[in-house]
Amino acid sequence: MNRAFCRTVVSACLVVVSAAAGGLAEEPRTVPAKEIPTAQLRVTTRVIPLGLESNRMRALNFDGQGTAWIGLVEKDRRKVVKADPLTGKAEQVLVTSEPSSDKLYIDNVVPVGDELFVCGGWYPRQILIDSKTGKSRGLELKKPGPEVFNALVVGGTVYSFDGNNGIYAWKPGEWSSELIPWPKPGKGPFAGVYVSADHSLYCPMWWQQGMAPTQPLLRYDLKAKKWTTLDAPWPSSKPMLPVEVNGKLYVADMFGGHLMVFDVASQKFEARYALPGYGKQWKYLATFNTHGPFVVCVLSTFAGAPNANKTFGFDGNSHHFVNRIMMFDTRDGAAAMVPVPSLSGEGYATIAYLQPRGDSMYLTCVDSPRVEARPKTERGAAYLVEMQLSRLRK
């Protein structure tokens, strides 16, 4: 494997979405994201083969030793991937000895000390793994019918988001738990970000058919133990996956092609940016994270929502795959789409999640084989892409 970084200058995409005009007086401004000039944008990539195949790699997290733990959804659903991001050496780790179940859907594996906290989807128990011995155990949950795909660690407490019941607060070591109930009927928070400035969790609700067309952003004050519903001022917006940069939350409008800005101090949505390529090359953005001053997300063609030319792919073919990310510079509201290399150079990079570590950002990918210039299937060789984004500004 060639571990040298491959430097690529990526052409920025011209923004074609116009700013909203003539909206309601109380509606904050909508502006097109500026184009990042080609000469300013620098991207370095290193492709890291993992020596295994996957239907779709899932979320990636790093433990204190720098080991990567990756969710995996296969026919046998009881496994996760343990990988060295430097060498690419990888193995699959069994999370339970019980029979495989469709209820087990491992999106996230969150390292907590020497243990791994497994977000098991609809699995009826909370799974913990000793990362040294590989032994696992299941803890009883307080409510049946869970839906847990995300968790985060805040000040020694693990908060796991059960979209059907609320938020679990787990104490590592003894692993006792408290359920913070979602007080309204229907779906609750499925993920969240912690903001230290007001000691609160900001959470999205996963949108699905039959729910209100405009969704709120949810805030839970950990000190006051109080829920607040934050309604976006733009009709039909669906706040998803917030990330924080310098006291502001950047929130995806998942199907609307916008990045919304929420000011934590004033507790108000203050602006939104129209992102390049929406409705023509992509229709859905997800899996947000930050990389320095950049907000970075994965773009999808989303087969359920046709693009302007009635196809779904970046290359004009009908498929639901992703091989590009969107980078947004929070310093001046500029954006660009960035392609991600395939492992073989001939396949199609199907990206799932991204996670920063140190000066780099890592993406979980599958090299999907092509047939007639489009992906034949999502299944293929699994790999990581180590990426560094920078911008030369005058």
Image (cartoon, rainbow, N blue to C red):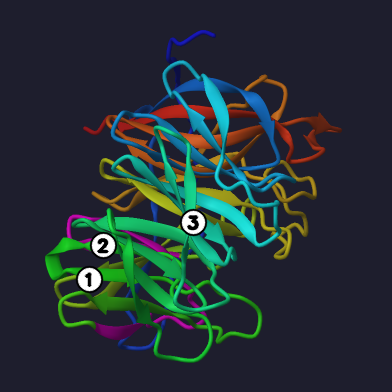
Q: Mark 3 points at which residue?
A: 119
Instruction: Please tell me which residue is depicted at 38% across the width and 73% down the height of the picture.
Output: 167
- In the image, 121 versus 36, the foreground residue is 121
C-alpha gap between disc 3 and disc 2? 18 Å
**Seen from this angle, which residue lies furthest right?**
372
Q: Are marks 2 and 1 in contact (CB under 8 Å)?
A: yes
Q: Where is residue 365 in the image (x, y as percent from the top left)?
A: 58, 35
First in sequence: mark 3 vs mark 2: 3
163 part of magenta stretch: no
Q: Residues within 10 Å of mark 1 (few under 14, many from 20)?
A: many
236 part of magenta stretch: yes
User: In the figure, 236 relative to 326: above or below?
Assistant: below
Residue type of the residue flagged with mark 1? Ser
Residue type of the residue flagged with mark 3? Cys
In this picture, residue 286 sits left or right of residue 261: right
Instruction: Please tell me which residue is depicted at 65% across the width and 52% down the height of the picture.
Output: 98
Q: What is the magenta range?
A: 226-252
Q: Do the residues labelled 3 and 2 touch (CB within 8 Å)?
A: no
Residue 134 seen in this snapshot:
yes
Q: Name the residue under label 1.
A: 200
Q: Mark 2 points at which residue?
A: 194
**Magenta region, main secondary structure:** strand
Q: Position of residue 382 (x, y in %)?
A: 63, 30
C-alpha gap between disc 3 and disc 1? 21 Å
Residue 257 seen in this snapshot:
no
Q: How crowded is mark 3: few (under 14 residues within 10 Å), some or many (20 or more)?
A: many
C-alpha gap between disc 2 and disc 1? 6 Å
Number of the front mark, 3 or 2: 3
- In the image, 45 versus 169, the foreground residue is 169
Q: Position of residue 30 (x, y in %)?
A: 38, 70
Instruction: Please tell me which residue is depicted at 61% across the width and 76% down the height of the picture.
Output: 208
